[in-house]
Image (cartoon, rainbow, N blue to C red):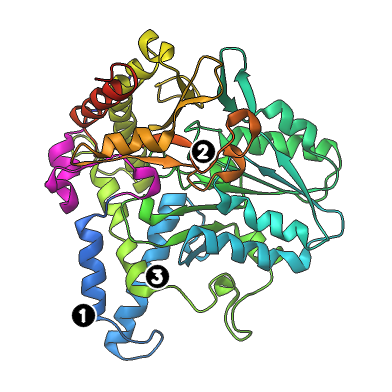
Amino acid sequence: MTTLTTPLDVQTECRAHFPSLQSGFIFADNGGGSQCLKDVADRIYDYLLNSNVQFGAGYSVSIVSTKRGTVDPQKAAAVLFNAASPEEISFGGSSTILIENLAHAMEPLVNEGDEFIVSFADHETNVGPWVRLASHGKAILVPWQPRPVSPNDNPYNVALSMDDLKDLITSKTRLVAFTACSNILGAWTHPKEIAALVRKVGAEKGAKKIEICVDCVGYAPHRRIDVRDWDVEYAFFSYYKFYGPHIGVLYTRKSSLDNSLTSLAHYFLKDHEKLEPGGPGYEVTYGTTGVLPYLLSLAGNSGLEGKSDGELLDVAYQRIAAHEEELMKPIFDFLLSEEAKKAGVRIVGPESGKVEVRAPTISFVVVGPDGKTKRLQSKDVVAKVHSQPGIGIRYGYHYSHRLLARPDLGDDPADGVIRVSLLHYNTTEEVQKIVDILNGIIVSPN
């Protein structure tokens, strides 16, 4: 990757803001949850001790509480989504509950025979709610399955195909749900291109109304979300995988909020609260406001005076991407080596460490001579890694059960894949240590 930005000073600009990283433990299970910024934790602490009162009252502490718990978090998240208005932002205990609520709010307005195209390369968060909605009888589920890219060479290299999606769209298509970056495959799906295809083909086939829902959980820590540029109605991410507390956030385009959803809130509450029944934990929503300032700081200080938050985020993510490519180099050098291939290593997803292709969410398996049956169980490889102190990676299906339950991707989704998932606060030295241990387990065991 070529970049004109200054490289990140990972120790000073990044790791210094995460107290947990000072222990020296190598956190390489970031796809399951990132480490939390100190500023985020400080804000939660401060809210509970200094502004923990009911919203909406006229006294001074309640005014502060309302601003901290609702106004400021919505504004910050709107910047991260590039939403048109903070009113398009909803919070919930997790991304899973937010999309469950979204499907529930949509259901009364779904027509008989409406078709829901749902990617089966996704975390269950953006699959299960639509499957359940269809199972209630009115809508029809249309799976969008990833296909093998090089079945003869590596059957585990699968990807979503735009050609397949085009064939799935009909005059009855009502919703298309997919991920911006699979938490197993690690590949970018390019939401803007998908949305443009959906609009074009849908119009050609006479679809009356198509909405698009994008899972950005595995995308947000690595690249900038831009719902207006993408032209999508719904998008969401989890702050606890994005340097914050355990809470999810959902963008809903204002027109969809007004016309496509019924309210789940108390009947007397405002429409913009319709997807927040009971409200979130407001000390937690206030904590999320610590994430945006940190990301903006990663733009650096040189020559950026007068830039908008969006422009600063663009620079910050360019710097993140450049560092991520450096992180991926040692592990892909190992995984794609002749020695690793002979030992049975097969990457699950694209066989590339280029940041134009993927995030540093890297999954693989170790197969035998037939190229399919596992020579080493994923859980056994990970257990041996964990026998070395101070490292955390993960095995399993990572809540993408439908993907890894496919017969061509193995016969035991519980054992699933070995996943090393990295973030910009990881170092190349940490990655090299993981590589050395994996090499000793898979290629050159004692």
Per the image, the residue denoted by label 3 is 71
Along the horizontal axis of the image, is 82 left or right of 27? right
* Amino acid under disc 3: Val
Tell me the element at label 1: helix
Disc 3: CA contacts within 10 A as few (<14), some (14-19) or many (>=20): some
Query: What segment is highlighted magenta in the picture?
Result: 8-34
SS state under label 2: loop
Q: Which residue is mark 1?
A: 49
Q: Which residue is at 56% across, 12% downward?
A: 153
Label 2 and label 1: CA atoms lie apart by: 39 Å
Residue 146 appears in the picture as rendered = no
Q: Is residue 10 magenta?
A: yes
On residue 182, the disc is 2
Which residue does the image show at 25% across and 78% down from the upper left? Answer: 48
Inspect this view and state whether residue 87 appears.
Answer: yes
Residue 16 lies left or right of residue 279; in this view the side is left
Label 2 crowding class (10 Å Cα cut-off): few <14, some 14-19, many 20+? many
Kind of element beneath mark 3: helix
Precedes in sequence: disc 2 or disc 1: 1
Relative to 132, residue 347 above or below: above
Mark-to-mark CA distance, 1 and 3: 19 Å
Which amino acid type is shown beneath numbered disc 2? Answer: Ser
> Which quadrant holds the C terminus?
top left
